[in-house]
Image (cartoon, rainbow, N blue to C red):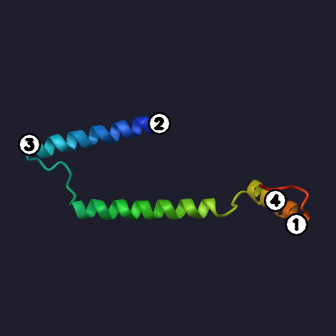
Amino acid sequence: MQQAIIRLGVLLILFVNQALVLFGWSPLPFSEDMLYEAGSYIATVGAAIYTWWKNNNITEEAQEVDRILKDAKQNKKVKFK
């Protein structure tokens, strides 16, 4: 539900922005290059944090599960598909 509301909000902002551009007003005080650089930076930081989080067992519970999995693979008590 939150994602739908966020998408709707972004769409409304874009519609208002486009309407202002049609009437010759510059609604955003940023250049297109500045927006591209900011978006690129945010995407890079987000991707870096996500991949770091997904590829590392950070919580104590995740570390325990990793130990159990490694032990089970070594002892071949559990079949993995």
Q: CA distance from mark 1 to mark 2?
A: 44 Å
* Residue 2, disc: 2
Residues at circles 4 and 2 in contact by the CB criterion of under 8 Å = no
Q: Amino acid at mark 2?
A: Gln
| Residue indicated by mark 4 | 69
Q: Badge 3, how many Cα within 10 Å: few under 14, some, many 20+?
A: few
Residues at circles 4 and 1 in contact by the CB criterion of under 8 Å = no
- Nearer to us in this view, 17 or 72: 72
Q: Amino acid at mark 1?
A: Gln
Q: Nearer the viewer, mark 3 or mark 1?
A: 1
Decide which of tag 3 and tag 2 comes sooner along the chain.
2
Q: CA distance from mark 4 to mark 1?
A: 9 Å
Name above or below for residue 45 compared with residue 3.
Answer: below
| Residue indicated by mark 1 | 74
**Which secondary structure lies at badge 1?**
helix
* Residue 23, disc: 3
Decide which of tag 4 and tag 1 comes sooner along the chain.
4
